[in-house]
Image (spheres, helix red, strand yellow):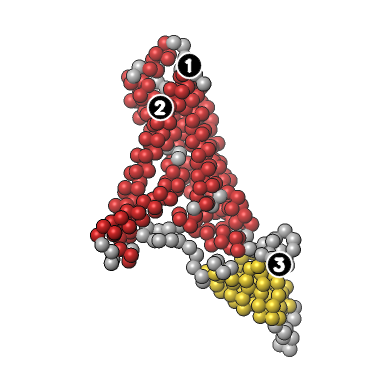
Amino acid sequence: MKILDRYIIRNYLINCLLALAVMIGMYILLDVIVNFNLFTRNHAYQHATALQAFWGLLREITTFYLYRTLVIFSMISGIIPLLAAGFTMVRMTRNRELIALLASGVSLYRVAAPIILCAVGFNILVVVDQEVLMPANISKLLRKHGQVSASFGPDEPIYFVPESDNSLVLASSYDARTKTMRNVRIIQRNKLGDAKAMILAKKAVWKKDIGEGPVSGGWRMYDVVQINAAKAANPNDRPEPVKEMTYQTPVTPGQLNLIFQKKAVEYLSTAQIDKLILYSTPATRVALEKIMYTRITQLIMNMIMLLIGIPFLLAREPNKLVTNMLWCSAISAGCFVTTFVFFQLAGAGLSPFAGAWLPVVLFGPLAIVMLDMVKT
């Protein structure tokens, strides 16, 4: 790596950190101001001394926003590379460094290359954040302001969860801690969706050490009644209850946890969302597909926005830099708004695939044209 590359990369990374600190700091400051009263409602501080209350409140706010930073980073990841590139180019232009490079015969593409390379690395950090860090801390991210923890209660109902064999699972409540379903109904259906049998049980408990096949474990069901749909109309045909039986299904406790986490599906990894799609209704499946597609195209759009903005920043004439930056801000803002609109239409007015990929199709060629217009 040459001295020029190291110099540009060092300045660019410093500007990235500054832009991140400013954006995250502004977000946290505004959020604390708006929601400060929610933190002070914690009953643990009501009988504490002033000093204990202060340190307890400070610790709670710090912990809350420490994990919230993962979400904020994902939200602002599209604008940070362009902001850092703007700061880097302004500094090089102001110090006449860009003019010296041009006078020595260095191409402007050569100046932009380290910035683009760093932006790719920045996108890798976004992937790590979305695929590793946020899924690993999902319980922390589900916390609300002033809430000590966020977990699923012991009485979460299960409504018509589909299985791979077209059956439906219902339960009046599910306790994730004990992995127990109560008042269970399993409606077994044929390929046309018609009910062919029903299994009723007062309780079903997940056991890891039972069952065979691709699913390790199964549900131990108690006080079970099996009803044949063809004979259900005959009042004289009343099946005898079975005290205990085992039922195997792909609907495992892990899968149920994913289903309950649909309200926080943006914090799940792509692999978890893909599994969740298999056991979701058609309407929910569209929303999940939208998240998967937009998660990919957002990374591409981050690079496209940078490539569109860089030609304005690579100004050969310093007196035009201010005008170029205004044009860069306007076009980048238009690109950002258009992308946001298409992402919102994905799954609504447009299919998830079309809504996610249309911004790439529209602005990808523009980025190539803008790069070609750079006067080296």
Q: Amino acid at mark 2?
A: Asn
Q: Secondary structure at mark 1?
A: loop
Mark 2–mark 3 Cα distance, whole angstroms, equals 59 Å
**Tag 2 near tag 1, CB within 8 Å:** no
Kindly give the residue lying farthest to the top in the view shown.
Answer: 104
Dot placed on the residue nearer the N-terminal end, 2 or 1: 2
For label 2, the residue is 11
Mark 3–mark 1 Cα distance, whole angstroms, equals 67 Å
Q: Which of 264 and 6 lies nearest the eye of the viewer?
A: 6
Dot placed on the residue nearer the N-terminal end, 3 or 1: 1
Q: Amino acid at mark 1?
A: Ser
Please state the horizontal and vertical placement of residue 91, each as a whole percent of the image.
35, 24
Please state the horizontal and vertical placement of residue 338, each as a whole percent of the image.
46, 41
Q: In the image, which is nearer the foreground, mark 3 or mark 1?
A: 3
For label 3, the residue is 210
Please state the horizontal and vertical placement of residue 119, each as a whole percent of the image.
48, 32
Instruction: Place residue 160 in its image quadrant.
Output: bottom right
Q: Residue at 37%, 58% (x, y): give it.
A: 145
Q: In the image, which is nearer the foreground, mark 2 or mark 3?
A: 3
Q: Secondary structure at mark 3?
A: loop
For label 1, the residue is 107
Q: Residue at 61%, 76% (x, y): give it.
A: 203
Work out whether residue 297 can be spotted.
Answer: yes
